[in-house]
Amino acid sequence: MATRMRQLQLLTAARQLAAGRDLQFLATALDDAGLPWALLKGPVLADVVFSRPRSREFTDLDVLVAPLQVDAAVRALCEAGATLMEVDWDHVNAARTAELGLTLPHGTVLDLHWSLVNLGRTRDAYRLSTRDLLDRRVTRTVAASEVATLDDLDMVLHTALHACLSGGHQLRWLLDVQQCLRWIDRTPQDLAVRAHHHGVTVAVRAVLDNVVTQLDPTCSPWADALAPGTAWNALLRRISRRSPPSAPSVSSRTARSWYAATRPTTAASAHALARTARLSLLHLRRPWPAGTPRAASLDDAGYARWVEVARQEALHDEHRRPPQSR
């Protein structure tokens, strides 16, 4: 057992060293191209947020770029040595997916995002302007590199929103949020104002309630600051008590479906829940090609359609952007 644990530790260390080198690679490629970008999630949480640095494992890199510049970002990375992973363009474009996968020179997978919310129908329910997020970005030291990240409030809200839309139920997601709340040097009211600005109050409140119930009651002021909560939040609290993270897999899968369906409006929540339940009943799993992923072509018509989706949504967002809250 000790030998196996040592092997896992060495494997994790090697993977994170490779990710650090790939982070330097992508930072150079995007900076040389003059493109604004921000590093998200895993490595930022591991090196900046967690009270024990590097105690949080991560296996890939997530980067946010502006939707109008995503084509330039993909081409800059590929010209520098990254490889665009094989894509089902029909599925990606039908879902209006705001993410592409690339393989970096040292083997790390890069998820390149032009929005913090991946799926189009889910994204429509929120007011997360990528332009505003990138305007507020700050520089931090991550994996021995100086890189741009989301500002403190946006980083905490993204961590909570990602946890909710992913199912909001695994302890590792709740621990990410709890560590963020212990780390941030802002008030609960500051977080509530920014959450309202982004339209994510219901989703963030759902996750904070779960953090308080399952992990850390001292986080309750953060949840209480996010208004009284809706009937949906009350329902999620009841579900969470009946199906905690330690519950059998069938029970926890049901809870995850309810969290993933969380939206700012009842109608949007009902639609999302119906879709989640339908996929769960059908046990739908998209097939992935076996073996090493093949490279996709930037000349593919599907890629051009994907870039056009990003451009159209960016132009649409300019007409509905609320005033910025700092």
Image (cartoon, rainbow, N blue to C red):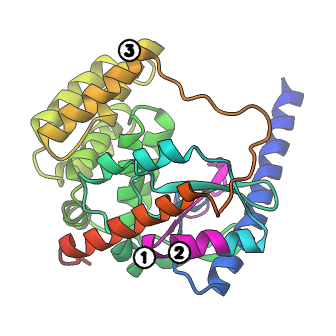
**Quick check: is 290 in the magenta stretch?**
no
Q: Residue furthest front?
A: 301
Q: Amino acid at mark 1?
A: Leu
Question: Which element is circle 2 on?
Answer: strand
Q: Residue at x 38, y 14 (%)?
A: 281
**Nearer to the camera, 222 or 38:** 38
Pick the quarter of the image with the N terminus: top right
Q: Nearer the viewer, mark 1 or mark 3?
A: 3
Q: Which mark is residue 281?
A: 3
Q: Amino acid at mark 3?
A: Leu
Residue 82 in the image: state x and y as whole percent: 74, 64
Mark before the other along the chain sequence, 2 or 3: 2
CA distance separating discs 1 and 2: 7 Å
Residue 298 in the image: state x and y as whole percent: 65, 63
Where is residue 216, by image quadrant?
Answer: top left
Asked whether the beta carbons under mark 1 and mark 2 sit within 8 Å of each other, the answer is yes
Per the image, the residue denoted by label 1 is 134
Q: Which mark is residue 37?
A: 2
**Nearer to the camera, 44 or 186:** 44
Region in magenta: 47-75
Neighbours of disc 3 within 10 Å: few (<14), some (14-19), many (20+):
few
Residue 220 in the image: state x and y as whole percent: 25, 46
Q: Can residue 202 be seen? A: yes
Residue 98 in the image: state x and y as whole percent: 45, 56
**Quick check: is 48 in the magenta stretch?**
yes
Q: How many marks?
A: 3
Name above or below for residue 146 compared with residue 57: below
**Nearer to the camera, 226 or 325:** 325
